[in-house]
Amino acid sequence: MNWRFWKRDDAPMPAPGDPDWERSLINRMAVEHLRDQRRGRRWGYIFKLLILLYLIGILAAALARNAWEGLKTGEEHTALIQVKGVISAETEASADRVITALREAFEADHVKGVIIRINSPGGSPVQSGYIADEIHRLKEKYKKDNEKEMPVYAVAVDLCASGGYYIAAAADQIYVDKASLVGSIGVRIDGFGFVDAMKDFGVERRLLTAGANKGILDPFSPLPESQRAFIQAVLDDLHRQFIAAVKTGRGDRLKGGEEIFSGLFWSGDQALTLGLADGLGNSSFVARELIGAETLVDYTKKKDLFESFAERLGANFANGILHVLGLTEFGSLR
């Protein structure tokens, strides 16, 4: 085998006083330059190949998962829809994603029931309301079209609070773990005020508005009592909407008093006593014992392959820059 491709040319250089020394040096430099170029191209090809294999692996895993889910949907099953994290238009728990999953589950063949598995501290009342309203609409439509009910259960994991409970209340029944945190039926708005700090530093605030209340909740301006009362009235109205949704969903199962709607939260065991939940159990228990279809098929709308890859690539790049700057991750110092 010819090893010259891999071996360095070890021919000795002429002595500095030799007439061919300069020519040999130039030749040696040219050879080294060409060798470095070939080496760089080889590593470039290897790097590109590794990226291609990585992308192919991600695609194959996604296709395999979809194929497996497709095989399972050919039998009677329970549709699982997850509401994870903060509920807002920009997150995985957005109304668009959850409602799309709900519609697919209600329209799919062989679905015997739907489980909404919630692990959320809450979020946007608008997004939560969209989802709750759609649950009611889909149930009514399914009953009208099929002359039977589609059972919908909410299952709380660690947190089923605020907007998460708003969604859960739209289900037929709510199941929790004994240590789940449930409730927080209330509305909040928060911020900071820096008026006194600005005075201490001698900073003058210059805010120009067209409209007497356009600068409401500006953190550098005082909050007049009239604006405070207005904001409180808005919060109270939103709170009444929340309470009405819970009472509509839970009905006479609620056993507690007004403290239920005070913004407090309780353990799963306490939630059962107060009528905020119907029983203890996880998703597998509900699918097996209540719906009667033990096979769970996840209908949750996750980010697509390229969206997830782009975010992961961006996060890895950002973390690499932070590492160079002496940071280990976003927001923390080494």
Image (cartoon, grey):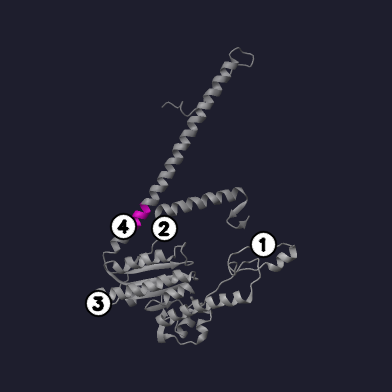
Q: What residue is drawn where x is 37% and y is 78%?
A: 172
Callout in the foreground (4, 2): 2
User: N-terminal of the two: label 1 or label 3?
Assistant: 3
Residue ID for mark 4: 67
Q: What residue is drawn where x is 39% and y is 73%?
A: 133
Amino acid beneath label 2: Lys
Tell me, yes or no, whether the highlighted magenta stretch contains residue 62: yes
User: N-terminal of the two: label 3 or label 2?
Assistant: 3
Residue ID for mark 2: 303
- Give whichever of 323, 245 is nearer the camera: 245
Answer few, some or many: residues within 10 Å of disc 4's Cα (few below 14, many 20 plus, some between 14 and 19).
few
Which portion, as a residue range, is magenta? 60-68
- Give whichever of 193, 123 is nearer the camera: 193
Where residue 72 appears, as percent x and y from the top left, is 29, 63
Q: Which mark is residue 147?
A: 3
Callout in the foreground (4, 1): 1
Question: How far apart are the two marked residues, 4 and 2, measured between alpha carbons?
Answer: 17 Å
Under tag 3, what secondary structure? loop
Amino acid beneath label 4: Ala
Location of residue 22 with respect to 306 vertically, above or below: above
Q: Which mark is residue 206?
A: 1
